[in-house]
Amino acid sequence: MAPRGCAGHPPPPSPQAWVCPGKMLAMGALAGFWILCLLTYGYLSWGQGLEEEEEGALLAQAGDRLEPSTTSTSQPHLIFILADDQGFRDVGYHGSEIKTPTLDKLAAEGVKLENYYVQPICTPSRSQFITGKYQIHTGLQHSIIRPTQPNCLPLDNATLPQKLKEVGYSTHMVGKWHLGFYRKECMPTKRGFDTFFGSLLGSGDYYTHYKCDSPGMCGYDLYENDNAAWDYDNGIYSTQMYTQRVQQILASHNPTKPIFLYIAYQAVHSPLQAPGRYFEHYRSIININRRRYAAMLSCLDEAINNVTLALKTYGFYNNSIIIYSSDNGGQPTAGGSNWPLRGSKGTYWEGGIRAVGFVHSPLLKNKGTVCKELVHITDWYPTLISLAEGQIDEDIQLDGYDIWETISEGLRSPRVDILHNIDPIYTKAKNGSWAAGYGIWNTAIQSAIRVQHWKLLTGNPGYSDWVPPQSFSNLGPNRWHNERITLSTGKSVWLFNITADPYERVDLSNRYPGIVKKLLRRLSQFNKTAVPVRYPPKDPRSNPRLNGGVWGPWYKEETKKKKSNKNRAEKKQKKSKIKKKRKQQKTVSGSTCLSGVTCG
């Protein structure tokens, strides 16, 4: 059984793996594994073990010995790591008390994205990453895809892995899908991934991989490709398990062939669970949720260290691009912190949508820099396809931009605006109206847009407090310690200059009505391009009890039965019509003869 915790060790390459003959390679590989084991031990004992300089020297040594001399593909290896619910402040280089040495190092040596936006909840961020389109253009503009809904990412959207496969990439996904699974066609392996190992739902137990959506609606949620991965029901913590799978994929892949790895970790989403040894460094944190969250994030940081080491060990690193992103802001009630930003996960305040993000790659031209240009999660789609030397069909209307030169060379971003969202079925603001929107827009509708320095919100933007770190008492974030704001009666429009006021403290909507009108018109233009919302009611056939105790596709089989029944009924109807016709013809022919007109 694999070791507990998050460290793990890269597995030996499979017989099918890329190999070079000769004793020297075998000796080099053995030396490399010894170095990797020593490095992993050094990471586990941070603060007590290896000094930074020694660790750096060993990393360089591992890279020198194990990078292949074979000419690499001109197409870079693409590694996209998506954390779940990581707060804006919850990384060392943003001033967190949580130690994230790997993230800090990778970001410092790469490009930090400090004007980077995602969506406020899980499904929307993932759908926009994989399609390059805003929610309003996929019908997923309301909430998330729930386990019991017959809903998924629309099948007529070409996904990022599908486009990368067209140009020769091997595509693998490890981790959380959360883009729907009610039909087999919705599964990751049918949406462009050669392999999939992970969960289909939005959350679940980190050890048992079970999820209850409601009383009596519980099931197992761990998949290998299209089947439940019962063999892995052995209590391994998901962060460790996913990292081990990534190591196995890299060990068995030829590094001269391009690979796309989408690693969507479950951490640090609730439930708050972590292996015991990660709590040792956080005993001083009084709030139990914050302490658990810190342990989970430390474990995740270590896992990313092991992914990076595997990239170096198996010869991928020198031609790789590693992108790190959170999917939305942190949830203070579940230990996350977005301070000093306003709001939290699930809101359109900056704390819900401004994310931790960076790019790390030997291929970057300007390393060790900070990018303050506007970047959005939809931008990864065209950027990665372009880096892969792929083509985007002219008739596909994307909302993302190719921002590689912005990141790598420090050029201006082609992006000047972001539609954060328009949700026509979210709870309407009581005081919103067309009049408040100058007859241009109904401000009861929840929406948010950014144009250059300006950000406009309408409707009900969500929980709007600032939650400072000291508010994390033993009982949870104490609202009496938060900086609270009382919204004035009738308020349904807010305007901020985000460049000058990133913490959204000064509402300028009354001072600049002209800018408000301009942004409302832009919202209205976007709304004209929106497709209908896809948010169907729950389907009782989704219950895992009807599917062998597993969350999984349920719709297609039932549809087939219905179709076959329908076809039988249609055939019966046809047969009876034909019989009736023949009978009528016989009767007509018989009556003609009896009349004696043409008989004989």
Image (tube, rainbow, N blue to C red):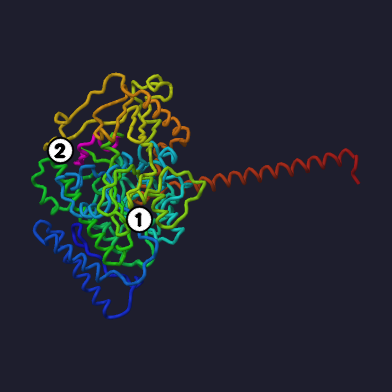
Looking at the image, residue 177 lies above or below residue 454: below
What is the x, y in percent for residue 210? 28, 49
**Residue 222 shows in this picture:** no
Disc 1 target residue: 173
Which SS does the magenta portion mostly show? loop
Task: Identify which amino acid the numbered label 1 is placed on.
Answer: Met
Specify whether 587 is left or right of 340. right
Mark number displayed over residue 526: none
Total residue callouts:
2
| Residue shown at 17% from the left, 65% from the top | 57
Check disc 2: other Cα within 10 Å, few if <14, some if 14-19, many if 20+. Answer: many
Mark number displayed over residue 469: 2
What secondary structure is marked by label 1?
strand
Dot 2 or dot 1: first in sequence order is 1
Queried whether the magenta region covers residue 170, the answer comes back as no
| Residue shown at 37% from the left, 56% from the top | 227
What is the x, y in percent for residue 302? 20, 56
Specify whether 320 is left or right of 465. right
